[in-house]
Amino acid sequence: MKMSTTIQQRIEELKEQLNRWSHEYYVEDKPTATDAEYDKAYHELVALEVEHPEFVTPDSPTQRVGGEVLDQFQKVTHTNPMLSLSNAFSKEDLEEFDARLRKLTNRAIEYVCELKIDGLSIALTYQDGQLVLGATRGDGTTGEDVTGNVRTIKSVPLSLKEPWNIEVRGECYMPKKAFVALNQSREEEGLEVFANPRNAAAGSLRQL
């Protein structure tokens, strides 16, 4: 076996391990590795990639850029408008909404209910399974390119298991625990605190 092949295999092993640990920590909230174990593996990966840049890939944990504060963002025109639903404040509002859907689809409608998380709407575009664009909703037609900042969010996959061309839309939000910790840190530094978690999520995404 050639030395380069062995090194490439080790890099792939480290990437897979680090990405798994990050998912366990940031998504599942069930870490199986200590900070010291993660740091040791991460530093080994950095050293190998510095010596062998030909093996660096977009899905490597080292490619999660920290970035400087960005004052301006490139505008992005959404392929399909990012719209939102109107609020329903009464039983009658819900019944009217259901009636409109049944009329449009001419079939029975099944609903899934979930908690409303107040954050910043975001669209993630993957090409051949690689994250190539992260954009805010903006006015629904045109948003802001925040790809560099999105790449710092460790719960966002840089690559998919399949080479799909797909757009994923969701909500970028900050848990209350993280919000309290962030405001405490800002207050200690003499900075203005955020009014609520939604503003903190939106502000952080635009200022990373």
Image (tube, grey):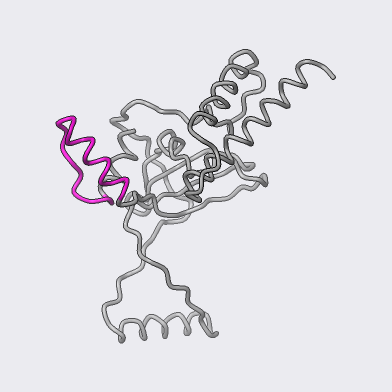
Q: Toward which corner of the image does residue 76 lie, by quadrant?
A: top left
**Is 48 displayed left or right of 8 in the figure?**
left
- Rendered residue at 30%/71% (across/down): 87
Q: Is residue 195 above or below residue 53?
A: below
- Rendered residue at 37%/86% (across/down): 95
Specify whether residue 31 is painted magenta: no
Q: Position of residue 85 (x, y in %)?
A: 36, 68
Q: Is residue 151 above or below residue 39?
A: below
Which span is picked out in magenta? 177-198
Specify whether residue 194 is painted magenta: yes
77 and 122: which is toward the camera: 122
- Rendered residue at 45%/28% (across/down): 65
Q: Toward which corner of the image does residue 44 lie, by quadrant?
A: top right
Task: Report the quarter where the N terminus lies.
Answer: top right
The rendered magenta stretch, by its main secondary structure, is classed as: helix
Give the farthest residue toward the top. 51
Q: How many marks?
A: 0
18 and 150: which is toward the camera: 18
Task: Report the quarter where the C terminus lies.
Answer: top left
Q: Position of residue 100 (x, y in %)?
A: 42, 82
21 and 48: which is toward the camera: 21
Q: Position of residue 135 (x, y in %)?
A: 42, 44
